[in-house]
Image (spheres, coloured by chain):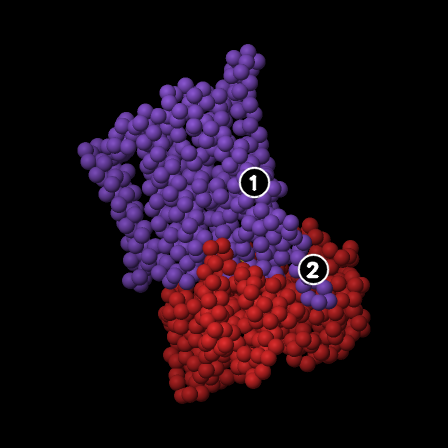
């Protein structure tokens, strides 16, 4: 083994030690858990940055994906399974056994007091870990993708939204005795934001802020989202703003090629995501019926439906499977198969948007890189090799296909929609007819 | 069996098969000897580099062929008997056809050097080549690439990705100097050297030396240099796979000779792709063009002709593309490495990054003949229209944005090019 690969191993060990340092209060009672947490996250950050600078030292002129299938962690080998199991376990603890995490919750107490003025709970711990992951792995993504302006901006954007809008501001709101509110999440992803219970709670708050929050959430859901999606496609949300997308594009970036691109997985996707959307629409509607009729029509049914949704979709699907299975099923399992917000944005993207991925004449060599690295499992190549633009409901516009394509065939564009759906290339007696 | 029989499941044969299925209900059979399923040869390097697995470079799912009712036969054709419309295979099968498409591709050219059969000397053409290179790479920390073409540079990248020291022997004064202008070659050379490759220019191999066990030890060049290595990959071009047709009565030269409908001298027998030689190429195109794009179009045209829609093969404006490590290359139309007195280059180069833009044009009429892009993506359709419709250089510059295909947020590139162009105009006037 060369010196070089020894150093690479070293980075991995340092990161692992960092993780153990953070987690050690779970196993031994220790008084300095906060210091350990800060120290642990610090060395993880340092080793990730140093490793990225080394791994991607030749990436100033291009993005590199070689060796992806030679590394166990990115090729579903033992280390990938261990990581998947650990992440899944963590999610199960957070959702259903928070007591077991008590020592770690204690470790973030000082931050919670400082930011929110109240003691920490498992959700604050979770948010802190989540945000750290987006920031640390976002830095890695910035190093890896530094030669492509689109990726740099997109990555900075998700880091900003996670850190400021999904972590700092909700915390400050609590400190100011205001309701905790996430300005970067909307119904139906944040499904309870249009539930009668939430709305009643927010309107009952003193001051105008609660009303503003209702207004903000509703206008983004019903006006902002359709308008932005018309102009930019669903990417404005899914890979620039959303926290789930943010984690996928940063911490999940190394696992994007694990998403299946088979036609059967595409079938499964449509079979699950649209019923999920229907589920949350029905839950929301019944809650309103119930609220307006004071429970006379539906009795307990709507509350039951709502908590079933919360358990099955909100916790199990989006958290445990969605993130826990990154190293096994790829990064966007939740976004692709489950997210009702992605479902709505997708329908609009497909039928009423200026966004498409344009293909460049007949330059495609059918190499398959675009399909392999599509985190949504879209068989990009099947369109590109026919010279057809890609207009797909699931595309989150991450732009990696355009980067990994060795022949410059793909380009994300928002243009007038008249030639969005073009015909495939036709052979003629004057060469290819390009549409 | 009868119907359409296609020999070779590369891009040419497969294009013919898929297009034929679109056009007819006839039985379609594809016989090939390398693998049952079509895969993308152009992506072999990425399998070696661990960027993809073999399953990723198959452009169609295995179930596709059944769905399309295209029969795949994994066998080798040894002989064609046009008189009885039959072919004979390795496994002793006799297959009859109504129409036959020969799309057998090509094989790496041999150098006829002393010691060329030593262990440790490889080519890159098939999946099995990739497997052999993979095995051999474990026991080497240094290797030599012979031949400065598009495949040679891919081999450099492949081995560099495994941390192996690469020596790249180029016969010409520069890598790609038969195709690109000197400043462009220099952009590439700097980039390739930055990637840690040792380029040795003006080096022509004359012999290989081995040890007693028949393993490669070193190779010698005309200039008297000797390179110690146990692994060499030779990529000095390809030759059509046509020897099995000897005695069949099909006219051949370097490749299988075809007319403008891609039909051979025998009715009902067509040829497409790397193995094909045009009797009378048009538009200044070459008689044999062993590239992906040519094979794909030829396969489609053959299908049209078989289906009774006579269509001549006229590939129009030449285009090609490649990637040299991080630098993408695209070319459209005609840009020679050296200009004549009637033509000039508009050449822009980015001082900061390996990136250049080259327009070849007629210096009296300003009519554009071709484009070269390095590290910049050109718009295929737009470039082709400009060449066909004889745009002038200033017309191109007026709508330069539309000639580029770079990702969003790359506006600074056309801005820099235009600034340079306007300065040049100012100086010249
Ligand atoms: C490593 C590499 C990289 C390349 N990169 C590019 C690129 O980036 N861009 C580009 O334009 N071109 C590229 N090329 C060239 C391009 O791949 C070829 O031009 C193209 O594959 C030719 O296709 P084809 O179908 O004519 O022949 P092939 O792909 O050679 O297919 C012919 C098939 O027929 C089979 N066959 C041959 N004889 C018989 C027989 N007697 N019986 C049965 N089967 C038989 C062969 O086994 C083979 O599978 C590259 C080539 C290589 C090797
Ligand atoms: S990566 Fe590019 S060349 Fe390869 S299949 Fe996709 S579009 Fe075609």
Q: Which sits in the foreground, A237 or B171?
A: A237
Q: Secondary structure at mark 2?
A: strand
Tags 1 and 2 on a common chain: yes
Taking the image as shown, residue B133 lies to the left or right of residue B391, namely: left
Residue A358 image offset from top left, x and y in percent: 58, 54
* The residue positioned farthest toward the front in the image shown: B429
Residue at the disc numbered 1 = A346
Q: Is A86 on the left or on the right of A316, as rendered?
A: left
Q: Label 2 neighbourhood size at 10 Å, few (<14), some (14-19), many (20+)?
A: some
Q: Chain of mark 2?
A: A
Decide if residue A379 is in sight here.
no
For the N terminus of chain A, the quadrant is bottom left
Q: Is residue A334 visible?
A: yes
- The residue lying at 54 percent from left, 55 percent from top is A411
Point out residue A359 in the picture as x, y percentages from the top left corner: 58, 56
The residue that mark 2 highlights is A426
As drawn, A291 above or below A312: above
Q: Locate the C terminus of chain A by quadrant.
A: bottom right
Chain at tag 1: A
Letter of the red chain: B
Q: CA distance from mark 1 to mark 2?
A: 29 Å
Look at the image and give the colour of chain A. Answer: purple
Q: Is mark 2 within 8 Å of ligand 2?
A: no
Give whichever of discs 1 and 2 has the lower sequence position.
Answer: 1
Q: Is mark 1 within 8 Å of ligand 2?
A: no
């Amino acid at each position: 083994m060369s010196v070089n690969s020894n150093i690479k191993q070293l980075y991995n060990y340092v990161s692992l030690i960092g993780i153990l340092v953070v987690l050690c209060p779970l196993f031994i009672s220790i008084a300095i858990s906060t210091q350990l947490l800060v120290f642990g996250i610090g060395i993880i950050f340092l080793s990730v940055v140093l490793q990225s600078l080394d791994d991607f030292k030749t990436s100033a002129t291009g993005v590199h994906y070689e060796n992806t299938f030679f590394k166990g962690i990115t090729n579903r080998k033992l280390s990938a399974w261990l990581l998947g199991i650990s992440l899944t376990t963590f999610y199960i603890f957070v959702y259903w056994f928070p007591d077991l995490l008590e020592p770690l919750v204690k470790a973030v107490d000082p931050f919670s007091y400082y930011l929110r003025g109240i003691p920490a709970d498992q959700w604050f711990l979770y948010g802190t870990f989540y945000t750290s992951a987006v920031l640390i792995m976002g830095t890695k993504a910035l190093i890896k993708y530094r030669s492509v302006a689109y990726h740099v901006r997109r990555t900075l954007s998700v880091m900003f939204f996670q850190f400021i809008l999904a972590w700092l501001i909700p915390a400050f709101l609590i400190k100011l005795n205001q309701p905790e509110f996430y300005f970067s999440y909307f119904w139906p992803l944040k499904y309870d934001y249009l539930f009668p219970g939430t709305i009643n709670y927010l309107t009952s708050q003193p001051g105008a802020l609660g009303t503003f929050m209702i207004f903000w959430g509703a206008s983004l859901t019903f006006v902002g989202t359709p308008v932005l999606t018309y102009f930019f496609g669903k990417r404005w949300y899914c890979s620039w703003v959303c926290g789930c997308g943010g984690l996928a594009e940063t911490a999940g970036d190394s696992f994007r090629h694990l998403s299946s691109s088979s036609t059967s997985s595409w079938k499964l996707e449509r079979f699950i995501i649209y019923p999920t959307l229907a589920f949350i629409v029905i839950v929301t509607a019944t809650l309103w019926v119930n609220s307006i009729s004071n429970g006379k029509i539906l009795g307990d049914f709507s509350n039951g439906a709502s908590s079933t949704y919360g358990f099955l979709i909100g916790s199990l699907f989006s958290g445990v499977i969605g993130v826990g299975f990154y190293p096994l099923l790829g990064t966007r399992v939740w976004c692709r198969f489950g997210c009702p917000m992605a479902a709505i944005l997708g329908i609009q993207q497909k039928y009423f948007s200026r966004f498409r991925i344009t293909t460049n004449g007949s330059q495609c060599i059918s190499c398959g890189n675009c399909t392999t690295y599509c985190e949504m499992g879209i068989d990009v190549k099947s369109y590109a090799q026919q010279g057809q633009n890609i207009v797909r409901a699931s595309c989150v516009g991450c732009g990696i296909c355009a980067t990994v394509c060795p022949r410059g065939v793909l380009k994300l564009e928002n243009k007038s929609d008249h030639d969005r759906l073009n015909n495939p290339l036709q052979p003629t007696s004057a060469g290819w007819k390009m549409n | 069996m009868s119907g359409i029989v296609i020999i070779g499941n590369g891009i040419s044969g497969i294009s013919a098969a898929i297009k034929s299925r679109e056009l007819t209900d006839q039985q379609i059979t594809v016989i090939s000897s390398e693998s049952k399923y079509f895969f993308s040869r152009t992506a072999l390097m990425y399998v070696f580099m661990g960027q993809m697995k073999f399953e990723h470079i198959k452009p169609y799912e295995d179930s596709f062929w059944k769905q399309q009712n295209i029969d795949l036969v994994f066998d080798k054709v040894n002989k064609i008997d046009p008189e009885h419309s039959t072919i004979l295979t390795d496994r002793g099968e006799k297959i009859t056809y109504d129409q036959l498409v020969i799309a057998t591709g090509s094989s790496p050219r041999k150098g006829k050097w002393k010691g060329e059969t030593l262990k440790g000397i490889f080519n890159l053409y098939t999946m099995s080549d990739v497997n052999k290179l993979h095995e051999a790479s474990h026991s080497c920390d240094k290797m030599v690439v012979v031949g400065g073409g598009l495949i040679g540079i891919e081999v450099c990248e492949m081995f560099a990705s495994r941390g192996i020291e690469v020596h790249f022997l180029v016969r010409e004064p520069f890598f790609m100097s038969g195709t690109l202008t000197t400043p462009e070659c220099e952009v590439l050379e700097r980039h390739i050297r930055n990637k840690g490759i040792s380029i040795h220019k003006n080096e022509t191999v004359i012999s290989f030396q081995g040890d007693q066990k028949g393993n490669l030890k070193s190779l010698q060049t005309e200039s008297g240099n000797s390179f110690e290595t146990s692994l060499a990959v030779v990529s000095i071009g390809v030759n059509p796979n046509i020897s099995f047709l000897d005695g069949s009565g099909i006219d051949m030269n370097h490749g299988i000779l075809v007319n403008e409908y891609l039909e051979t001298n025998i009715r009902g027998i067509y040829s497409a792709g790397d193995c094909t030689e045009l009797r009378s190429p048009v538009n200044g195109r070459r008689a044999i063009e062993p590239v992906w794009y040519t094979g794909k179009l030829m396969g489609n045209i053959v299908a049209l002709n078989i289906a009774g829609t006579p269509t001549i093969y006229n590939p129009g404006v030449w285009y090609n593309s490649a990637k040299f490590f991080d630098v993408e290359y695209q070319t459209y139309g005609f840009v020679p490495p050296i200009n004549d007195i009637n033509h000039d280059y508009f050449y822009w180069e980015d001082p900061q990054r390996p990136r250049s833009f080259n327009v070849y044009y007629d210096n009296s009429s300003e009519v554009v003949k071709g484009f070269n892009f390095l590290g910049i993506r050109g718009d295929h359709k737009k470039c082709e229209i400009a060449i066909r419709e004889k745009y002038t250089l200033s017309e191109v510059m007026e709508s330069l944005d539309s000639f580029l295909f770079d990702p969003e947020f790359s506006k600074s590139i056309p801005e820099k090019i235009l600034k340079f162009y306007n300065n040049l105009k100012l100086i010249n006037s």
